[in-house]
Image: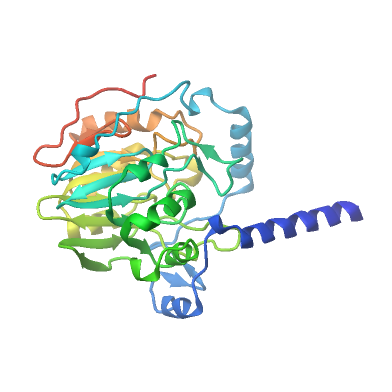
Amino acid sequence: MFYLFLFFVVVTLIVILFIGIHPTFGGNAIKKQKTAYIKFNNFSNGKFVNQVPTKMSTSAMDLLSMIKDFIAGRKDRSPSGPIQESIIDWNKINSEKDSLTWFGHSAFLLSIDNKKILVDPMLGPVASPVSFAGSKRYGKNMLHIIDEMTFLDAVFITHDHYDHLDYPSIQRLKSKVGHFFVPHGVGAHLNRWGVAKEKIIELNWWDEIAFQGLTVAFTPSKHFSGRGIFNRDTTLWGGWVILGKNTRVYTSGDGGYDSHFKEIGKKYGPFHMTLIEGGQYDKRWAWVHMTPEEAVQAHLDVNGKNMMLIHWGAFTLAYHAWTEPVERALQKANEANVNLITPKIGETVSLTGEVTVPFSAWWGI
């Protein structure tokens, strides 16, 4: 019994040491920042909190059922073969026309008023702090795309989870990005990874700033944060509003459905294009992730004209079929008369005038 106890102590110490040393886990806010956070109405007892009380714990029964689902596994949780991807048209991306290019999950490149903005650049091969564990990308490693990109005016991060903030991606990006827009606390991760402090702009919910002719605002979502065992909710989470001369864009970030969408629509709508998460849902964590039907409703709440479903198509994080999110979203969008576009990964969509993408059920491999 003593040796078993000693074994667990040693393993625990190794894990703690690894988390403290390995840079992928990020950094921590300094004392000055924490003192400033105390004044925020979404910060309490050393943690960021949601606008409404949110259940953030998992019951023993839910945990056991998730373990059972993980062991049993569904063959359709991941593609049975290579997924269809579009050849990236860099000439179209680099033109002065407003456009949107999706890289799978929640990563996309937005061209608006000739500004190039990359959102949630998770382009690495695995959504995990270590390469040997975690959800692996369906397609090929996409880190090489960063090398093909021209200078980026900005990178926007919605929160610090591994499937949105990727250490290898930031390492390749940091030398070719003008500014990083992040929620409060996330700057500490970027600082540790070598991003210059003067490049980082941290915002709280409803903060609004002007950026090179664009209006940028950080908006609430109902979610949580954390990259390690000891830093849960020590950084903020949310969505982004990006308003150009002719194109108004909103991306939700991760989060459960609630009244904040109507608040966002009232303050910043209408939106020419919305990108709403709805691809990693489960009744056991319904408070922090939306179903496809809720995603369509969120689009309507924010007063969007054209919609794209995100948070799917690259990684398996939930227990439903990998194609179920887009299939359910399409059905709901049809019922609600919503123009839901479904471009292939890597395909560039023009945001000038009517937003159309020839329908192709490319996920039906």
Extreme residue in the right direction? 2
Question: Left or right of 69: which side holds 345?
Answer: left
Decide if residue 94 is in sight here.
yes
Q: Position of residue 238 (x, y in %)?
A: 36, 58
The image position of residue 120, as x and y in percent, is 37, 50
- Image coordinates of residue 326 in percent, x first then y, are 34, 31
Visual colour scheme: rainbow
Look at 66% across and 57% down and name the residue there: 18
| 142, above or below 79, in the image | below
Q: Nearer the viewer, residue 110 or 114?
A: 114
In the rendered view, would you say 16 is above or below 108?
Answer: below
The foreground one among 64 and 197 is 197
| Residue 110 horizontal side relative to residue 168, left or right | left
Q: In the image shown, does 254 or 149 lie closer to the viewer?
A: 149
List the single residue furthest toward the top: 365
Give how far across and how far down residue 77 sits, in percent. 49, 28
- Quick check: 246 left or right of 142? left
Q: Residue at x 41, y 38 (%)?
A: 142
Residue 50: image quadrant is bottom left
Q: Residue at x 49, y 24 (%)?
A: 76
Which residue appears at 76% of the width and 54% of the height? Answer: 11
The reply to whether residue 302 is visible in this rendering is no
